[in-house]
Image (spheres, helix red, strand yellow):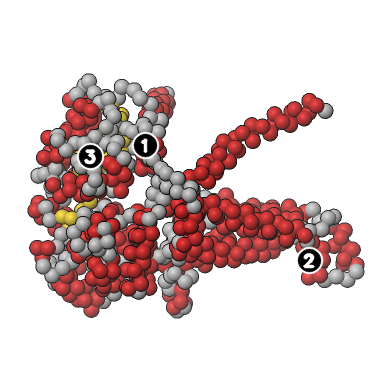
Amino acid sequence: MHKRKNAFIIMTVPALLLFFTFHTYPALQGVYYSFTNWRGYGDFDFVGLKNYINVFKDERALHAYLFTFKFAVVSTILVNVISLIVAMGLNAKIKFQKTLRAVYFMPNILSILIVGYIFNFIFAHFIPEIAEGLGINALTRNILGDQDVAWIGVVIVAVWQAVAFNTILYLAGLVTIPEDLYEAASIDGAGPWRKFWSITFPLIATFFTINMVLAMKNFLMVFDHIIALTGGGPGQATESISLLIYRGGFEGGEFAYQSANAVVYFVIIVVISVIQIKVLQRREVEM
Amino acid sequence: MKLHSKLVTGFVSMALGAALLTGCSSGGKDDALEVFSNKSENTETYKALIKKFEEENPDIDIKLNAPPEAETVLKSRLTKNDLPDVMAIGGNATYGELARAGVLMDLSDSEMINKIQPAYLDMINRLAGEEKEGTYGIPYATNANAVIYNKDKFEELGVEVPKTWDEFVAILDKAKAEGEIPLYLTLKDAWTGMIPWNSLAANIQPEEFAKKVNNGEASFQEDYPEVADKMLTLLEYGHQDNMGVAYGDGNTAFAKGEGVMYLQGNWAIPEIKKANPDINLGVFAMPVTNTPEENKLVSGVDVLFAVNSDTEYSEEAKKFIEFMINEQNAKQYIDEQAAFSAVEGVFQEDPVMEGIKVNFQEGSITSFPDHYYPAGMQAENLIQDFLINKNKDEFLKKMDEEWEKVQNR
């Protein structure tokens, strides 16, 4: 018994060390620098809470927060609805089931820069040309160039790509539901709608929780989609918090200030994730 | 069999090359002079010139290091006190920071600066700031912010290169009336809006604008209304989706004959020619005012040479820079790179550049105003926003506020 414990410790310690060195330690450093006026190099002084006070007074940061939340909530809901539907379809006894599963997983393995390039082309040339042919005036311009709707373009791409991964998680959940439950429900005369709400949805609740939390967290940290599609524009219409932190911190020489922003953001993400887990776990059922 | 061994040698030399490259990027100190470059486009030219230099100076060994994300690499090496011996970097805010950090050698009493156009020396001195006396870099290659025009279309319209703002707008009006796209704008990429902005601001703003703002003697609200108005005027002459077209698509469209004029820098010309080698292009400096003599070309330092103040090889480093600014070598550089030279008497002879050659000969050039804005305010996105919402007063106020906010951090 003792030996086995040692073996487990030997297995976990390297991972812990690596995690601490490359993740926890830099994160703590970031917290440390957020109380200074460091520019990324050179000398610095402690400035107390000045950076934090400035973050709360920064309209640009506020705008980035609002955009990010709007984007994350809409995308999380869409991704979960769509991927659940796709997963149920792929779980049903259909032809080419395996091929289709592979096809639906494709977006997840494509690099975001390639995806961004393709969608940039679709938004800039493909849609406007079709719209022109059909005489739909509203769509003859690149929607990424319009401040009011550019975020929808980003949502479309982000959802398109994220659905692939969440579908896999839901599929894994659907497989765990025993077939006899559905048979019993059929005998009792339950329709498909009733079966979904009374059997399927409750039994994949753990997967629903995981998917909601993961999707929300990923979308709150959205960065590469925006770089690939709009660069935060037009104006600052699609500037997410990660993008703002990167731009200001690395390109703008405001390392310490944006570290403070990152710390605030970290706290917010933790709070949101904890609330999500608490609320969603309450409705999970045990088999 | 022969082919096989050739392949093997090829792979081995590639692997060796890669090993050498990683060897120098790790920054180990050895007995070679390290030349660090922040551009990937000009490495071939550097390599050729370095080879020539090494032949002339067999006792000096040079290692060229041009990593990706060079400015980040440079900044992180600065924190480790491990700067390269010679740095070939842009005349931008990073240079200013290095100069202020006191890690660059003061070259103001060397012979070399006498061979450089004073306008560019002045530019980089101002980047280092007032409190830092001296010249910490030798400007080498420069770029230009211009109006690129389709010569055939100018001929069809029967117009000449404009000398004043009114003439410029008259051409735009005429092109519009003839059903052409007068200006092919690519404002989906925010930075492309900075090209006209810099031309306008450089000729309109008061001297030493940035310094005056920091002293509270100037502001966007007082000094930029005309710039903002003229930006909005230009916007009227775009196409139907100014905010939806990006730089790459713009180059292709302009090459295919869409648009009479294109507001871009000299770096766009090779790209346009790639899409259509037969296009007949010309360039001119945007005439911003109605006094032709006052209109200057916006030109910045694309490459300057700076020397690490702690280098063991200061003599060798200076020798190398002297070699590079030698007229013949400077000419080779700008010919291969389609750039302009900061060295006196070295001019770009490409016929496309004919229209701005006079600016370099007479020294009627001025610097990029946005290089002196605080980097953290990210003016380009604010300007893009203004071009969408056209809210002049609010925008100028915001520019002032952002400037102040960033300075106070």
Report which quarter residue B3 is drawn in: top left
For the question of whether residue A225 can be seen, the reply is: no
Secondary structure of the residue carrying tag 2 is helix
Residue B340 placement (x, y as % from top left):
18, 48
Q: Return the mark for residue A196.
A: 2
For disc 2, the chain is A
Dot 2 amino acid type: Phe
Secondary structure of the residue carrying tag 3 is loop
For the question of whether residue B356 can be seen, the reply is: yes
**Residue nearest the observer in this picture, B46 or A202:** A202
Residue B86 placement (x, y as % from top left):
27, 33
Identify the residue at horizontal 11%, vertical 67% (top origin).
B291
For disc 1, the chain is B
Q: Return the mark for residue B78.
A: 1
Question: Does mark 1 fall on the same chain as mark 2?
Answer: no
Dot 3 amino acid type: Tyr
Quadrant holding the N terminus of chain B: top left
* Residue B243 position (above or below residue A95): below
Q: Nearer the viewer, mark 2 or mark 1?
A: 1
**Residue nearest the observer in this picture, A281 or A225:** A281
* Residue B179 position (above or below residue A169): below
* Residue B192 position (above or below residue B115): below
Q: Does A65 sit left or right of B293 as displayed?
A: right
* Numbered marks: total: 3
Are there few (<14), some (14-19), or many (20+) residues within 10 Å of tag 1?
A: some
For disc 3, the chain is B
Q: Which residue is mark 3?
A: B136
Quadrant holding the C terminus of chain B: bottom left
Tell whether label 3 touches label 1 (CB within 8 Å). no
Secondary structure of the residue carrying tag 1 is helix
Residue B158 placement (x, y as % from top left):
14, 72
